[in-house]
Amino acid sequence: MDESGIKKQNWDVKETELFLEILKELDMKKCLDGRKVRNNKLFKVAHRRMTAAGYHRSVDQLKFRWKLLKSAYYKFKREPDTPAPIKIQGWWRYEKTMVAIMESRHPLVGAGVHADRNDDVTEDSDGEASVLHWPQPCPDNTTQNLDLIIKMDPEMDSQLKIGFIGAGNMAYGIAKGILSGNVLPANVKVSAPSSRNFGRFQELGITVTHSNIEVVCGSDVLFVAVKPHLVQLVLSEISQHVTDRHIIVSVAAGVTLATLEELLPENSVAIRLMPNLPCVVQEGALLFARGSHAKQEDGALLRSLLHRCGLVEEGPEAWIDIHTGLSGSGVAFVYLFAEALAEGAVKMGMPSALAHSIASQTVLGAGRLLRDSGKHPAQLRSEVCTPGGTTIYGLHTLEQGGVRASTMSAVESATERARELGRKATAGSRK
């Protein structure tokens, strides 16, 4: 897993206790009120001490851990009689130290800061304060989900509720990847108007339904995996049930974040994601962009959920349509090339089944070597060519056929089509 803010492994008790003791000591040295915002410098000092003690976490990981623990403190301060089944796992181990940190008051802290003003304040990952919004249950929802911020920790993945509206290939690929992590099948639910694709989800142990509202009310992270022209209809239906606990992730090609935020309640957390079909075998390429109300930790949570699906990257929204042409549609371009490779072998006398098997392995092997070597494609291509050999003759024929220009034009055409779909979706949402 990458170093972008998600832990490589779960935190153990000793590591968390050490982290809290370090923060407590630094608070005393800096005369910090336990509820006040800690800046990046303080976490960097904590990071150095943790590293010296043999615990290798990034600064962002320490921030995320602190936010988890601080949110737990506020939750159980408000709800001291919370039934045991929904209590945070292991909270009792850290409660005493958290109380010591959060309820400390140092004389150098500015006067006029009262506990009742600060009780709802916590840090964002960039060190800025924001008000915590505790989730409200949907109508007729009989069980409350854990607060979304608590699920920032991979230890809590098994409690995270995931919903899919749409049961197509993209939803299926993402669901398979998510289930290969810590998310339990019982905590995933899929809705679609037709039962046609339900079988493969049910084989994974996933609950299926025809009710979109049922999925929304039982979810923390909701994937909207429908055709672009259906996004407005779906979001209009579910909008009144979307709360501040939800992260709405759209995989609809071309539908912009601005359109999503216009269709959702004010301040909703929206993320635009473009996966591709190889997510089904955990070899996908996924790119996402955060909306105006999605924080860094929301992106980190999504990355944590999706990392088993393949390569997961974040970028500006302008790249999403390009990624659609490059990778979303690009897999079909690769399939076409593999098909042509096999048909060339059949033309020269090889049995079809064998030709297709070798062609698929050739594409797989070439892709893995390209990814794992870190070399530019041109360098690897030149390593295959020998002067006067078979490969350079074949490449010459491909260049004569315009394969390079045709491929670039294919990516351009697919990108422009994604943008066109987005414009249509935007126009439809304003009618």
Image (tube, rainbow, N blue to C red):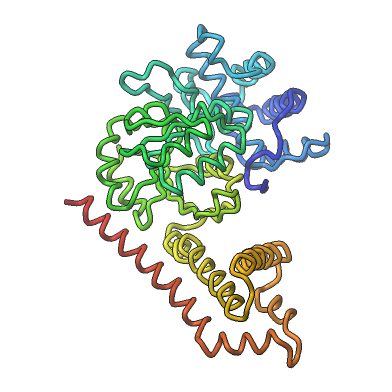
Of 29 and 34, nearer the camera is 34
Residue 356 falls in image quadrant: bottom right
Of 255 and 70, nearer the camera is 255
Relative to 28, say whether 225 is above or below.
below
User: Picture coordinates of residue 260 (x, y %)?
Assistant: 33, 47
Relative to 76, say whether 353 is above or below.
below
User: Picture coordinates of residue 84 (x, y %)?
Assistant: 56, 10
Residue 112 in view in this figure: no
In this image, 379 relative to 292: left or right?
A: right
Name the residue: 56% across, 15% down. 87
Residue at the far bottom in the pictured view:
388
In this image, 142 relative to 344: left or right?
A: left
Name the residue: 62% across, 16% down. 99
In this image, 336 relative to 370: left or right?
A: left
Residue 150 in view in this figure: yes
User: Picture coordinates of residue 137 (x, y %)?
Assistant: 37, 21
Residue 8 falls in image quadrant: top right
Of 241 and 57, nearer the camera is 241
Name the residue: 41% across, 25% down. 135
Give the number of marks. Answer: 0
